[in-house]
Image (cartoon, grey):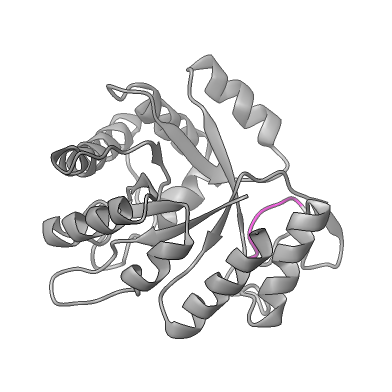
Amino acid sequence: MKLNCDLGESYGSWTMGLDSQVMPFIDQANIACGFHAGDPDVMQRTLQLARQHSVQIGAHPAYPDLNGFGRRSMQCSHNEIINLIHYQLAALDGMAQCQGASVSYVKPHGALYNDMMSKPAVWQAVLQAIASYHKPLQLMLLADNNRQSYQQQAAALKVELIFEAFADRRYTNDGKLSPRSQHGAVLHGNEVLAQVSQLLNDGSVTTDSGQRLALNADTLCVHGDNPSAIAKVQQIRALLV
């Protein structure tokens, strides 16, 4: 299983995350494209880091919501979603090409990701955006009980999917992430390592109601926004060896 991390989320003089410290331990970097975080200088530095450590480059597009860090849902039309994704993709991919690199996949951020997983109209728009980009790209989404349906719809548009699980989030019985407002939705310390070990050894997680949920995931989302998170990523990487 690969490790992916959301990176390049600083903006101007505001710093978010310890990108240089987490990059050596991951396989896939989801790089912000300017709509929720990131700016040209941050994007350039993050791309350079990814190349330095041979990390796969992914675009991390969002709703245009800098003030809310892309965590607020927006009522966008089908075409607006396609266009805002293409705009962000083109920016990151163009900058990557200037460094001899290339974007190979897309993982929507925040509210756009959540809407993609819960609203069929948004899912269709995101899928169409990936399918209509000028080169083949993979789409990263949440591994849940609907994997087969997502694969069938994506295959019809010749889009390859990457399914991800989360190291530090509790799951509901239907494979969704427990709302952050719910007690215990975010895992800490040994809970994270226990969930990762269960995923690796049994292909499952324990839900918020105590049930076993089978998850077929290709990649695991980790975070690198503080020193303790970096240490946890190192421990997770050791489990994967």
| Quarter where residue 134 is shown | top left
Seen at 78% across and 51% down, the residue is 203
Viewer-proximal residue among 123 and 189: 189
Residue in view at x 56 percent, y 19 percent:
155
Residue at the spot 44% in from the left edge and 30% down from the top edge: 127
Q: Is residue 132 above or below residue 184?
A: above
Q: Is residue 168 visible?
A: no
Magenta-colored span: 174-178
Q: In which quarter of the image is residue 14?
A: bottom left
Please state if 103 lies on the left or on the right of 147 as rendered: left
Q: What x and y, as percent, mark residue 88?
A: 23, 43
The image quadrant that residue 50 belongs to is bottom left
Q: In which quarter of the image is the C terminus?
A: bottom right
Magenta includes 30?
A: no
Residue 171 place in picture, x, y as percent: 70, 61
Q: Is residue 180 above or below residue 120?
A: below
Which secondary structure class fits the magenta region best?
Answer: loop
Residue 25 left/right relative to 43: right
Residue drawn 42% across the image and 55% down it: 111
Q: Is residue 121 above or below residue 135?
A: below
Between 166 and 114, the residue placed more toward the observer is 166
Label total for image? 0
Q: Is residue 156 visible?
A: yes
As drawn, the residue found furthest toward the right would be 211
Residue 222 is situated, as x and y percent measured from the top left of the image, at: 52, 64
| Residue 24 percent location from the top left of the image | 41, 63
